[in-house]
Image (cartoon, grey):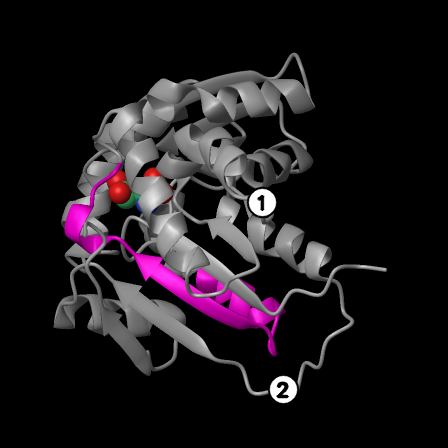
């Protein structure tokens, strides 16, 4: 018999992980969720592995104290560096986004895969290694796109400047004639319009948010009451109106229960 899960904890360095939460909520009505955005310390993507692991352990400890029974690391950068440390320290299931995202890229069926992410994710080569482990022989081209995160945080998801920045970063992948582009960062699905225009038709764009949510939903199974009222709590290490305004657009619903927290006590 499948173990029963009642409350999933999700953490990210900030707002971008709401793209993963949105897909989790869509697939699993009836399961409670607790979302932690470490907005005070964003970005993780420019930090060293040591710091990212330390922050990730703090986020996980906080959520575990809120009685979660499964942890989803929505942040690609934290997934790239901290999963082994998290699995070693905690005895609940810990899911990252790298494996599911890599699976989605491989399943898209192409042979020349572009991977974009934060500097730290790209430097870790976590996606390259996971994709190669799933299907050796694929050509992988990686590119860090550090300015994409602040553009999304500013709410500039689809304007002229965003498209210019995207062109500057992605031209090299266009020249490599990639057929699949993996969005290896929580924020990038929000830039999909601009990214797709730059890449042109014929390039399949996949992201790790939906594929991760599908894997988690498979683990949860369907033996729960989907009509049960679902509680969704938001814990932010820096609570700003901007976070809530953009967060509600990403989620397509109100963020009702939002708590300002201190992770470094
Ligand atoms: N959440 C991060 C990721 O998916 C992006 C934002 C950051 O750099 O903290 O890699």
State the residue in front, 188 or 96.
96
**Quadrant placement of the N terminus:** bottom right
Q: Residue 62: x, y in percent?
A: 35, 56
Q: Taking 46 as reference, is 100 above or below it?
A: below
Q: Is residue 36 magenta?
A: yes
Could you tell whether 252 is left or right of 246 in the image? right
| Residue 219 locus on image (x, y percent) | 70, 55
The answer to which image quadrant residue 116 occupies is top left
Label 1 residue SS: loop
Secondary element at image label 2: loop
Task: Mark 2: give few (<14), some (14-19) or many (20+) Cα within 10 Å.
Answer: few
Residue neighbourhood size for the residue with mark 1, other residues' Cα within 10 Å, grouped as few (<14), some (14–19), many (≥20) = few
Q: Is residue 179 left or right of residue 137?
A: left
Question: Along the horizontal axis of the image, is 166 left or right of 180?
Answer: left
Q: Residue at x 31, y 72 (%)?
A: 249
Q: Position of residue 189 (x, y in %)?
A: 40, 51
Magenta stretch encompasses residue 169: no
Front-most of residues 8 and 126: 8
In the displayed structure, would residue 78 be above or below residue 37?
above
Mark closer to the chain start, 2 or 1: 1
Answer with the quarter of the image where residue 137 lies. top right
> Which span of residues is magenta-colored?
20-44
**Residue 125, labelled with which disc?**
none
Tell me the quarter of the picture where residue 79 sits.
top left
Give the residue at x 58% y 35%. Answer: 99
The image's mark for residue 91 is 1
| Residue 228 - label | 2
Q: Nearer the viewer, mark 2 or mark 1?
A: 1
Residue situated furthest top in the rendering = 137
Q: Residue at x 31, y 74 (%)?
A: 248
Q: Quadrant of ligand 1?
A: top left
């Amino acid at each position: 018999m499948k173990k029963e899960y009642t409350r999933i904890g999700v953490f990210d360095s900030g707002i971008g992980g709401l793209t993963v939460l949105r897909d989790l909520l869509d697939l699993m009505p009836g399961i409670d969720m607790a979302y932690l955005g470490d907005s005070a310390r964003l970005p993780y993507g420019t930090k060293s592995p040591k710091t990212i692991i330390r922050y990730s352990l703090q986020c996980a400890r906080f959520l575990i104290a809120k009685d979660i029974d499964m942890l989803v690391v929505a942040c690609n950068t934290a997934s790239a560096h901290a999963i082994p440390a998290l699995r070693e320290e905690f005895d609940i299931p810990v899911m990252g986004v790298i494996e599911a995202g890599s699976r989605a890229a491989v399943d898209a069926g192409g042979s020349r895969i572009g991977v974009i992410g934060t500097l730290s994710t790209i430097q870790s080569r976590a996606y390259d290694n996971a994709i190669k482990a799933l299907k050796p022989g694929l050509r992988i081209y990686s590119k860090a796109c550090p300015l994409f995160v602040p553009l999304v945080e500013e709410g500039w998801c689809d304007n002229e400047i965003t498209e210019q920045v995207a062109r500057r970063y992605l031209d090299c992948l266009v020249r490599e004639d990639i057929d699949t582009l993996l969005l290896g960062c929580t924020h990038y699905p929000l830039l999909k319009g601009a990214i797709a225009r730059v890449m042109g038709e014929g390039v399949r764009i996949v992201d790790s948010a939906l594929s991760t949510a599908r894997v988690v939903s498979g683990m949860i199974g369907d033996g729960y009451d989907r009509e049960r009222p679902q509680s969704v709590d938001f814990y932010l290490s820096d609570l700003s109106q901007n976070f809530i305004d953009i967060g509600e657009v990403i989620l397509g619903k109100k963020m009702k229960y939002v708590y300002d927290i201190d992770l470094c006590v």
